[in-house]
Amino acid sequence: MKTDAVRGHLDGLLLAVLEHGPLHGYAIIAAVQDRSGGALELRTGTIYPALNRLERIGLLASSWESVGERRRRCYELTDAGRRTLAAERTAWSEFTAAIGAVLNPAPQPRPAT
């Protein structure tokens, strides 16, 4: 799938994979790829700036976790992030319904003869 297709929906994707609990960056990438059946492959250069921005605006919180000798940052939704995710889902449903109505219109009834 084209990377451009994700543009504008990245925040919703990141919030959605964090809905069930904290994850670190690579786990977020893997979750998006897994949930999309491999169709979406996000790059670290794409998600880390987005995660930092979402944290800066209060939709995510992060903490450091040690795994052996390594430290990694884990991200989780805030209450504002959960509300934003709900709004993203509503907007997505409305968007896909509108696009679907144009691309796959319902058959029009034929006038009676």
Image (cartoon, rainbow, N blue to C red):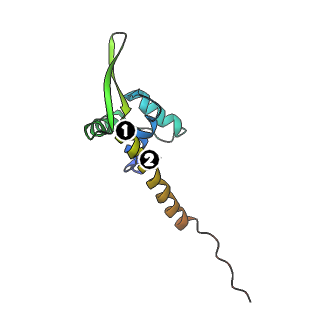
Residue type marked 1 = Asp
In the displayed orientation, state which residue is furthest to the top.
68
What is the secondary structure assignment of the residue under circle 2?
A: helix
The answer to whether residue 77 is above or below residue 96 is above
Q: CA distance from mark 2 to mark 1?
A: 11 Å
User: Residue 79 lies in what quarter of the image?
Assistant: top left
Relative to the observer, which residue lies in front, 93 or 34?
Answer: 93
Q: Nearer the viewer, residue 73 or 90?
A: 90
Q: Nearer the viewer, mark 2 or mark 1?
A: 1
Q: Position of residue 96 (x, y in %)?
A: 50, 57
* Vertical arrangement, residue 95 with respect to residue 20, above or below: below
- Provide residue 110's location: percent of width, then percent of height: 69, 81
Can you say whether 96 is above or below 85 in the image? below
The mark found on residue 79 in the picture is 1
Answer with mark 2 or mark 1, whichever residue precedes in sequence.
1
Residue flagged by tag 2: what amino acid is it?
Answer: Ala
Q: Is residue 66 left or right of residue 89?
A: left
Where is mark 2, residue-wise? 86
Query: Residue at position x 52%, y 34% from top?
Result: 34
Q: Residue at x 52, y 60 (%)?
A: 97
Q: Position of residue 38 (x, y in %)?
A: 52, 37
Please report the residue visible at 37 percent of the width from the left and 49 percent of the height from the top.
Answer: 7
Is residue 101 found left or right of 12 in the rendered image? right
Residue found 40% across the figure and 48% down from its top: 9
